[in-house]
Image: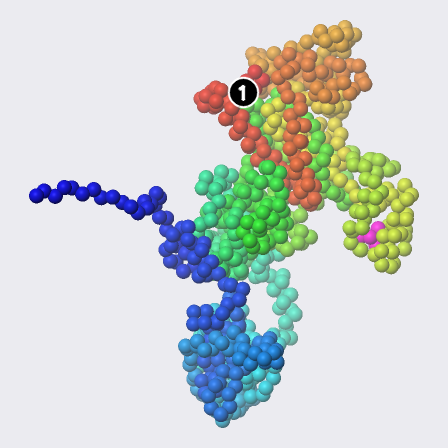
Amino acid sequence: MAVPPTTIVYTGKVRLRAVVRMRCPICNVQINKWNLKKHIDRKHTEQKTLDINARCHLTSQCIDGKNGIFAVMKTFKGHSIPLHVQCKTWGEIHTVLCQSNECQINMEVAQMSGLVSYHCKHIRSVSYCTSSAKTILLSEKVLSEMVSTKWFSEEKKKTCLARQQLANTNRVPLSVITTIGIPQTKKCISVYEPSMSYYSRLGRVIVVYDAKLNTWHCPCARLRRSCIHKYIAKWHLFETHRELFRTVISTEEALQANEQLCSFEERNVRDDHSVYPPKGVGLESIVTYILRNKKIPAALPKNLHVPTAYMYYPKNLFPEETMCQRCPSIVPLSDPMLITRKAKILTNWCIIEVFYLLDISTYCKQCPQCGMFYRYQEWKDHLHNFNDYIILDLALCLTLRNLLQVHTAVSRAVEYLQLTAGVQFPPSDTVLHAYLHFEALTDHEYKYSCVTCGDHSPVVVMDLHKKGVFKISVNDIKKPPENFRGEVDLETFWEALSKEMICRGFVVSGRCNPFAVPPSFHFWAPWIGRRTRRSNVVVNTEFEKIHFPKSLSEAAEILVSEDRLIDELFKQKVEVIRKLCKECGLDSSGSRSDLLLRLSNEMKSRQMYDKIFQKIWAVSGGWAVIMCPCGIVYSLKCNLRAESPRDFADLLLSWKHMPNVVIYDFARGLATHTNLRVPEKLPFSPFEGRLAEPTESSLALATCGKLKVSLPWLNTKKVMADPDGHPTTGSSDHYALYDRFHESNTKDRRDILRKLTLVPQLAGRVNSQVAEQLFAKMRKNNYFLNMTMPSTHLFQMRNIIHHYNQNRNNNILNRLKKTFGSEMVMNVHGLATFDRI
């Protein structure tokens, strides 16, 4: 009989996606990706209170088995010097004692409370000890050899032999090396001490030798002071690890000489280039090298833009250089030198050191010939090294950049990261400086150019961002030298700002930064795109504004009330208040409250109010911008004093090709001032920048709305270009016009010929309020930008506007691609007309 075919029915669950396995970065075990975090929490995260058991206990080693002396690690985490524990529960006398004073106090309190069986974690860990240190008998012959080679004197030899005889009499080992939890560069020797003291409660002391630093430490002696325990430890190491004594000078005579020359050597070490981080010329060299050779690409790989929680990071960060890049000959660098084992990698979701319990180590190298240092500064590992202790994941840097574009301060981003990760992040100022360090090294071109209007826009809109200011005292602005003519090297100035941002990774405080750029009239430059400006030397004649008004408060852009000025005065340090009292002719003695009371009373007079205002409160003059009608910023200038047409004239005179049409809310003042500065060739002509000659007939037609002035070259370039004509239009005419909202503010009747609506090619086609729209967005950044230092404010503003321009250009390109296609858009760049816009 034929057996009918059977149908296999699957009743279990079907896996819809493949299992993704990853390796644990700590124990290297393969595990399901979704279980990795739980695995790390359970297996590799130290709990706040750990119970001592067979699987979890402090590492220990038996030192003296007869008397029950053990060496036990102090803590579960990190490197520490072991301590002694006695746990003798055999023989006639039982002794259970811990060397730690804190543990002894806890045990005494527990016994008084009735907890007789309580023992500290060190004593309980001894129950799981499985190793014993090797005991050796030190030879007198070796000791005599050390005396003959002048390691110490004959008298010290007799002391060591007497101590050895006493140890043999008491049947205890003289010295024992313990190997539990100690780095390879350190040696811990347990030395016999017959007298009982606070550091030798159990009759032994731990002597530590650091082979890397060539230092000895004993709890009974100060640094660079000898003792019997150090001599015995040296005797032990000379017999067991003689290679350590090949380059180490440790004779008693040498120690005395070192003590006499200590101050001289320390002074040389501070001035020498062998200290990291370097200072002086060494600091300047490494900052310049990093700025010029460690650039980060402006277009990073796309996989960095999406943060991931399961990225592998290297544990040891070494500089990739092997040869000195500064010396003319081939000079190999030194071996990597450890900077720290406690570096932290900050990511979008955690701090690697805290989450994985890893020791992230950073290293540096040094040229033996010129002394220049090289540190880890590689972006290919998806990391950005700020100060060797704080390291940012590149995805976090991009996240901070995007958050700034949506007006979110770095301080708020840090608060968000702390709430998300559940760990304490570094201070927000440190994270901000680390991010600016990243932007300073990013290879931004800062084009400041529109993809449709090209590098030389024929029509521009100018305005001032009045609320974008930073606090600065008038006295803090350096006055220009007598030979200063208002010319500043733009590239040099902004490179100096970048060096200040980079140097913050080597200095603790901004006051110690040798690259700091304070506000000054002679070294303060705007930013204009490389192809837009005439040359690297730009015009900045803001020092001409200095006229010393009678009332500084009247000249200030922001009127400050007396109450607000008093509040600001109360925030100052006592040194500033005392100095201010001296300058105002007041008694500078007494407490801080007395000084503030005197100043508050004197502030009622106008003269004294102006003097205090000059010292305590003053703000910069805002940001002057020049934009194309598409909304792209072409020029950016931070004013130190209140705005005037001079600021915009400086920018226009720095351009390679002056725009044909300038839209400004004070067009008449701009045209008059600029023409007075260049009388030999009037920048605004014809008709002083008006659209027509100010005759009675033209004024009457303009008043009636019947006057139209056509500028056809705005749409189609002139066939026969004018001499010195604009490269886009071919015209050499330059007009200064009012925007729509300020054209009726003028009192001069002739300014009716500066109306934007008189030009058919511009009326209804140019958004003259594009600057105001930008400022509406930038005002959302004032709450954090206005609280920063001038250099930080300046550097951050240029960077924010740069990314704003990039996003705006990308939106324009996407819109043009949808309208005209990709091929048409490729041919449009730099040749755009207002019909296309």
Q: Is residue 228 left or right of residue 706?
A: left
Q: From this view, report whether residue 479 is shown above or below residue 271.
A: above
Q: From this view, report whether residue 86 is shown above or below residue 313.
A: below
Q: Is residue 820 left or right of residue 655?
A: left
Say if the magenta span includes residue 193: no
Residue 419 pos. (x, y %) = 57, 50
Residue assigned mark 1: 831
Q: Residue at x 54, y 45 (%)?
A: 397
Magenta region, residue range: 576-580
Specify few, some or many for label 1: CA neighbours under 10 Å numbering under 14, 14-19, or 20 or more: some
Q: Residue at x 40, y 60 (%)?
A: 27
Q: Quadrant of residue 535?
A: top right
Of the pair 804 and 497, the residue shown nearer to us: 804
Q: Is residue 680 left or right of residue 710?
A: right
Quadrant that contains the N terminus: top left
Kind of residue indicated by mark 1: Leu
Q: Quadrant of residue 132?
A: bottom left
Residue 642 pos. (x, y %) = 76, 34
* Circle 1 SS class: loop
Q: From this view, report whether residue 25 is shown above or below residue 109.
A: above
